[in-house]
Amino acid sequence: MKQVAVILVNYKDYAERFLADCKDGLRKQKFSGKVKIYCIDNSSSSESLDYLKTNFPEAVIIPREDGNYCAALNAGIKAGMADGCEYFVSLNLDVSLDERWLQELVSTAENFPECGIVQSKILLFPRNEAEKLDPKINTLGNVFHYLGFGFTSFYNQPSSRFTETESVQIKGYASGCSILIKKEVFEKIGLFNEEFYMYHDDLEFCWRAKLAGFTILLAPQSLVYHKYEFSRSTKMVYFMERNRYLTLFEYYDWKTIAVFLPMLAIMEFGQLFFALKNNWLDKRFEMYRYFLTGSTWTLIQKARIHLSKIRKIKDCDIIKDFESQIKFQEVANPLLDKVANPIMAVYFHLAKKIIIW
């Protein structure tokens, strides 16, 4: 069995808040292979570094100062490659793990040579006795929306509704909460895009992997209990929206962007209203400034050239797996459900008839 690198990223006080359960879960794994654990101390301080060295002695601690999550993942991947690892597992700190979590991830990767990426079955950390008996789902694979949004599937539904025990293909993208990536994927498509900094990194990477012909699987027996807080994500709205557009500009053919442009404009007006309502206009304008610089478009062009070299799948084929509506209850509201979603669905239905490249 190939050696596995497990990569954790600490950010400021996350280790003090979440490390205990994650560390205990890693120590209790029933896994027959070799494992090396790398903990990247992102936005490192002397206090966080000392805490990790004292409380997690079995991990290789790699300090970084700038807080760039994608660069932190890459630091762990490079360290694992230098140590001879061939499977790389990115795992959130804010999780509790089933004792067969890693064995099931690796077994799925071993049993399906054509698969490049495997995601665990990610459940919400139980908040009461009822949820301990039947935990709620966090995600069984995330969903691509054709305007660049990403959201979880089966969110907050009872896990008893999903009884499959064999691996299944994920049509969208794998959640970075618990994801195994084979070494050959990195060798073919490159590492994580450090320009993304944080958020949409898993969406961007999986889109790239799918364009190169790799499949993504769910390992339903690999169980993770995620202490998920949606409010933590909304604080990073600048990166979420900037990276949504960055992904679209890098991955879609320009003709596809032209087809989707009217719907993108309508959505942008809606996003401006939402930003005004939530006092996020400054973040919106910061995003606009980012795309009004020549260096940004130089980076986009370089990414497009790289993608043209590895691409095996056309836009018309990959968008078949994309969602036409935003179906995520944390952002649900009557305007979205009754107006925006129906309009987006009709537009996408018509757009797919035009996009043939």
Image (cartoon, helix red, strand yellow):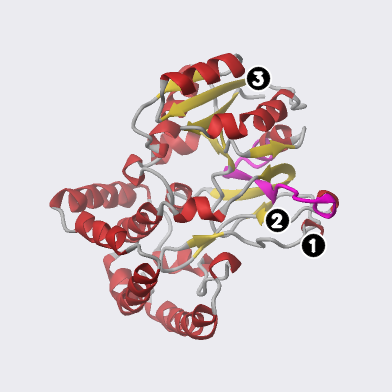
Nearer to me, 177 or 133: 133
Q: Earlier in the sequence, mark 1 or mark 2?
A: 2
Q: For mark 3, does the 10 Å Cα neighbourhood hold few (<14), some (14 to 19), or many (20 or more) residues?
A: few
- Regarding mark 2 in the picture, which secondary structure is present there? strand
Query: Which residue was labeled with disc 3?
Result: 34
> Mark 3 or mark 1: which comes first in sequence?
3
Question: Compared to 104, does 215 lie above or below?
Answer: below
Q: Nearer the viewer, mark 3 or mark 1?
A: 1
Residue 52 seen in the figure: yes
Q: Position of residue 101 (x, y in %)?
A: 72, 36
- Dot 1: what SS? helix
- What residue is shown with label 1? 161
Determine if the magenta segment contains residue 81.
no
What's the residue type where badge 1 is placed?
Answer: Arg
Q: Which residue corresponds to mark 2?
A: 137
The answer to whether 110 appears left or right of 44 in the picture is: right
Question: Do the residues bearing badges 1 and 2 touch, measured as CB atoms within 8 Å?
Answer: yes
122 over 338 or under it: above or below: above
Q: Nearer the viewer, mark 1 or mark 2?
A: 2
**Residue lying farthest to the left in this orientation:** 294
Residue 88 visible in rendering = no
**At x 79% / y 55%, what residue is drawn?**
164
